[in-house]
Image (tube, grey):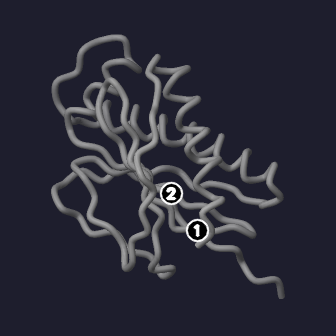
Amino acid sequence: MKKIYIDPVFEATHNVLQQMIGTKTEKGSLMTRENGFIGQDVNISIGVTGNLSGFIYLSMKKDTALNVASKMCGMEVNELNEFVNSALGELANIITGNSATKLSNMGYQCDITPPSVVVGKEIQFSTEQKEFLALPLHTDIGKFEINLSLQEEKSA
């Protein structure tokens, strides 16, 4: 997996979080994971299709998810429910859509699938690509993690 894929995704995440929630985002240390990753309390998955394909996952703890939803909705939310999941899915959709645009500007044609929100403890995620780039993000409303599993499709 190419490390150049993470920069447009980070940039999109940083911009969307700053514009929609009013928080700045700092990068942690980029890691490579083999054979998947274990998600946090709330995980949003969006597929990427085209000549670049795979998945982008946003993963966060419950408190961070509630803080994000509260900021997005302009009211305090105290529990994970369908409303919160919908808000988080929409946030991931916007981030990934902006990421796809940035990747397209780099010459990769790609589209995204609708988001899936998975809530639970220690859920194992893996894909056929087996390798993930993981980037922790630090904000004033909590920590996130971006996990990428993307590959270029071979031309026929």
Q: Nearer the viewer, residue 75 or 31?
A: 31
**First reached walking from the N terminus: tag 1 or tag 2:** 2
At 55% across and 61% down in the image, what residue appears?
Answer: 47
Q: CA distance from mark 1 to mark 2?
A: 8 Å
What label sits on residue 118 in the rendered view?
none
- Where in the figure is residue 121, as x and y percent of width and height? 16, 56
Q: Is residue 52 left or right of residue 59?
A: right
The three-letter code of the residue at mark 2 reads: Ile
Q: 87 above or below 111? A: above
Q: Which residue is mark 2?
A: 56
The three-letter code of the residue at mark 1 reads: Leu
Q: Nearer the viewer, residue 18 or 51?
A: 18
Q: 72 above or below 51? A: above
Q: 49 above or below 41? A: below
Q: Nearer the viewer, residue 109 or 107?
A: 107
Q: Secondary structure at mark 2?
A: strand
At 78% across and 60% down in the image, what residue appears?
Answer: 109
Q: Residues within 10 Å of mark 2 (few under 14, many from 20)?
A: many
Residue furthest toward the front? 29
Q: Secondary structure at mark 1?
A: strand
Q: Is residue 21 left or right of residue 51?
A: left
Residue furthest toward the bottom? 156
- Where in the figure is residue 140, as x and y percent of width and height? 33, 24
Q: Are marks 1 and 2 in contact (CB under 8 Å)?
A: yes
Q: Which residue is mark 1?
A: 150
Q: Is residue 18 left or right of residue 97?
A: left
- Where in the figure is residue 82, as x and y percent of width and height? 29, 37
At 45% across and 56% down in the image, what residue appears?
Answer: 30
Q: Is residue 65 left or right of residue 95?
A: left
- Where in the figure is residue 123, as x and y percent of width and height? 23, 64
Q: Nearer the viewer, residue 129 or 33?
A: 33
At 18% across and 62% down in the image, what residue appears?
Answer: 122
